[in-house]
Amino acid sequence: MSSYFERHIFFCLNQRDNGESCCADHDAQAAFDHCKKQVKAAGLAGPGKVRVNKAGCLDRCAGGPVAVVYPDATWYTFVDRSDIDEIVESHLKNGQVVERLVVPADVGR
């Protein structure tokens, strides 16, 4: 049985009101919007392909901003649009992890 989507990428868009660091402080919404646009432009969107999703806190705040690709369970951090472009091209399109953007396994909240 195959999955409805080949991959999901979830972007943490959590905003904390108590002053703690959060992904929203790093313009995660703009990264989400850009990824969604790039996935669509590359013809990767839709059933059997890639779904770009919003998420609340993913509990990896210390590595933020973060996004995770499933079913690969690859956690990414990113700085700008070029990082998102590289994730889309390398991982979402070609299945190759962008090692330089991977959040280390021991980074949590």
Image: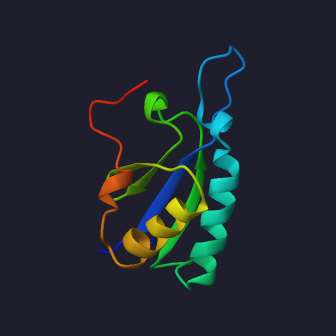
Image location of residue 11, percent across then percent down: 55, 49
Q: What x and y, as percent, mark residue 81?
A: 60, 61
Q: Is residue 12 above or below residue 53?
A: above
For the question of whether residue 51 can be seen, the reply is yes
Nearest to the observer: residue 41 or residue 83 = 83
Quadrant hosting residue 106 = top left
Up the image or down, 14 lies above or below 68; here it is above
Residue 72 seen in render = no
Could you say which quadrant of the image residue 20 lies in? top right
Q: Where is residue 93 in the image (x, y as percent from the top left)?
A: 42, 78
Asked if residue 42 is positioned above or below residue 61 in the image, the reply reads below
Residue 74 percent across, percent down from the top left = 33, 53
> Residue at 48% of width from left, 36% of height from top?
58
Q: In which quarter of the image is the C terminus?
A: top left
Q: Which residue is drawn at 56% across and 83% down?
A: 42
Comparing 33 with 6, the one in front is 33
Picture colour scheme: rainbow
- In-front residue for pair 46/35: 35
Which residue is located at x 50 percent, y 50 percent? 78
Q: In which quarter of the image is the N terminus?
A: bottom left
Find the residue positioned furthest to the top.
18
How many numbered dots are placed on residues in this image? 0
